[in-house]
Image (spheres, helix red, strand yellow):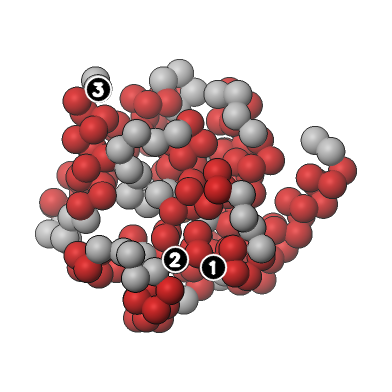
């Protein structure tokens, strides 16, 4: 890795350390290194993968009310139904805020952040990498299928994405939470390709 990239990553690591509570910061570091390893395996840009990993939960420092307020103000294109699933708002809002706060303009990084919670049909490899890294990073525990998914992500990335989407939907159904349209659309897309 070039010196300039290392310095840039260090800047983002410090920025997220300042912004999030310790457990969320640890999670972000775990996602960054997991995404970096997956980028090595799947031959995509490691620095961009790690940048997105560090910053993907940038908007999580705000409570859900504040997130909703900012989404309504700055992202009017979001569908109204998204507000029934407040836990997904931090993803599109994060993509918006890292542009504004950190001047990140690289669309590859922004779109991976935008879809890291719900996924979307037809994800790019970098998008699948961040989505998967968020679920399997080392600090996670107690999630269904973790050990197997950690292996699978390095063998068949799309299969890992499909399984995580299925587990997420099953969890939402079991816990009686509203299921956002984007997660369902993504799951249907990846199921049809299996
Ligand atoms: Fe997140
Ligand atoms: Fe996360």
Work out how far the residue at label 1 is from the one at label 3, CA to CA, in angstroms. 33 Å
x and y, in percent, of residue 154 in the image: 49, 23
x and y, in percent, of residue 104 in the image: 64, 58
Work out how far the residue at label 1 is from the one at label 2, CA to CA, in angstroms. 6 Å
x and y, in percent, of residue 161 in the image: 35, 33
Check the picture and name the quadrant holding the C terminus.
Answer: top left
Q: Nearer the viewer, residue 139 or 87?
A: 87
Residue 177: image quadrant is bottom left
Secondary structure beneath label 1? helix
Q: Nearer the viewer, residue 92 or 145?
A: 92
Residue at (25, 47) in percent of width and height: 183
Work out how far the residue at label 2 is from the one at label 3, CA to CA, in angstroms. 30 Å
- Label ID, residue 97: 1
Q: Residue furthest right?
A: 3
Crowding at mark 1 (Cα within 10 Å: few <14, some 14-19, many 20+): some
Is residue 31 among what the camera can see?
Answer: no
Q: Are marks 1 and 2 in contact (CB under 8 Å)?
A: yes
- Residue 52, relative to residue 154: is it above or below? below
Crowding at mark 2 (Cα within 10 Å: few <14, some 14-19, many 20+): many
Secondary structure beneath label 3? loop
Q: Is residue 11 left or right of residue 75?
A: right
Residue holding disc 2: 93
Residue holding disc 3: 193
């Amino acid at each position: 890795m070039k010196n300039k990239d290392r310095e840039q990553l260090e800047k983002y690591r410090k920025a997220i350390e300042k912004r999030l509570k310790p457990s969320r910061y640890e999670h972000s570091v775990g996602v960054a290194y997991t995404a970096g390893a997956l980028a090595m395996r799947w031959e995509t840009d490691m620095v961009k993968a790690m940048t997105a990993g560090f910053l993907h939960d940038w908007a999580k420092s705000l409570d859900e009310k504040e997130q909703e307020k900012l989404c309504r103000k700055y992202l009017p294109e979001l569908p109204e139904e998204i507000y029934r699933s407040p836990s997904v708002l931090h993803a599109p809002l994060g993509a918006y805020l890292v542009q504004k706060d950190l001047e990140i303009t690289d669309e590859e990084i922004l779109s991976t952040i935008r879809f890291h919670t719900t996924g979307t049909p037809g994800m790019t490899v970098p998008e699948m990498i961040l989505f998967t890294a968020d679920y399997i990073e080392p600090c996670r525990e107690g999630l269904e299928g973790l050990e197997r998914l950690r292996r699978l992500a390095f063998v068949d990335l799309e299969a890992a994405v499909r399984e995580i989407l299925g587990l997420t939907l099953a969890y939402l159904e079991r816990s009686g939470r509203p299921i956002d349209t984007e997660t369902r659309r993504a799951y249907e897309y990846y199921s049809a390709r299996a």
